[in-house]
Image (spheres, grey):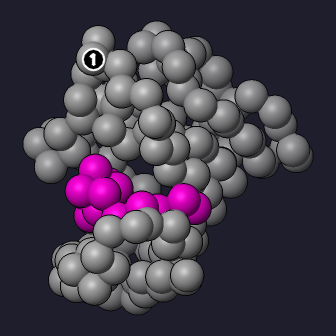
């Protein structure tokens, strides 16, 4: 973890299952307003750790994410099923979010769906497309996602 100011935090790659415990141990997250995470959305442990971090950062206003698509699939990893994720987060202060390295994978789309359901104040979610899949199919899915915020715009850049 590298702190960039009193209310910002940059976190890179969750690698251990016990990172969720680490997030709860540091009360500094309560004051965090900006967090950047690199996460492999297909790895259930990383998704749950990120959710724990978001839950422990109730004043989060800006969220930056980098989707990590690993070329090596570790069969011991717990495969994420984000659609079945029962974590109910309330990200009341989140206004802007961004996702870099978006490849259009179902895991990423499912996480975007959850994020849109957790953030009632969200105004903008910017997605940087780096995918090789059929872009029109994925864009149609993104546009159809329900949003808890009536002002939430999903912007996809290429």
Find out whether residue 103 is within the magenta segment: yes
Which residue is the extreme one toward the right? 5
Q: Is residue 116 above or below residue 90?
A: below
Q: Residue at x 53, y 19 (%)?
A: 15
Q: Specify start and end residues of the magenta stretch as a single range.
A: 99-113
In percent of width and height, residue 96 lies at 57, 71
Which picture quadrant has residue 9?
top right
Q: Is residue 75 above or below residue 108?
A: above
- 21 or 80: which is nearer to us? 80
Which residue is the extreme one toward the left? 84
Q: Is residue 66 above or below residue 84?
A: below
Q: Residue at x 51, y 44 (%)?
A: 68
Q: Is residue 6 above or below residue 118?
A: above
In percent of width and height, residue 19 lies at 51, 18
* Residue on which disc 1 sits: 75
Label 1: element kind: loop
């Amino acid at each position: 973890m590298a702190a960039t100011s009193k209310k910002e935090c940059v976190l890179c790659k969750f690698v251990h299952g016990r990172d969720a415990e680490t997030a709860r141990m540091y009360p500094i997250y309560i004051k965090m307003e900006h967090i950047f995470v690199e996460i492999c959305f297909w790895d259930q442990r990383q998704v749950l750790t990120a959710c724990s971090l978001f839950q422990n950062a109730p004043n989060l206003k800006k969220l930056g994410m980098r989707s990590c698509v690993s070329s090596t699939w570790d069969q011991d990893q717990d495969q994420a099923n984000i659609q079945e994720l029962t974590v109910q987060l309330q990200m009341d202060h989140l206004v802007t979010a961004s996702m870099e390295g978006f490849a259009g994978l179902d895991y990423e789309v499912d996480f975007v769906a959850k994020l849109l359901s957790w953030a009632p104040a969200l105004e903008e979610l910017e997605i940087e497309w780096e995918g090789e899949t059929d872009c029109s199919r994925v864009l149609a899915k993104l546009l159809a996602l329900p949003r808890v915020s009536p002002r939430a715009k999903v912007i996809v850049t290429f």
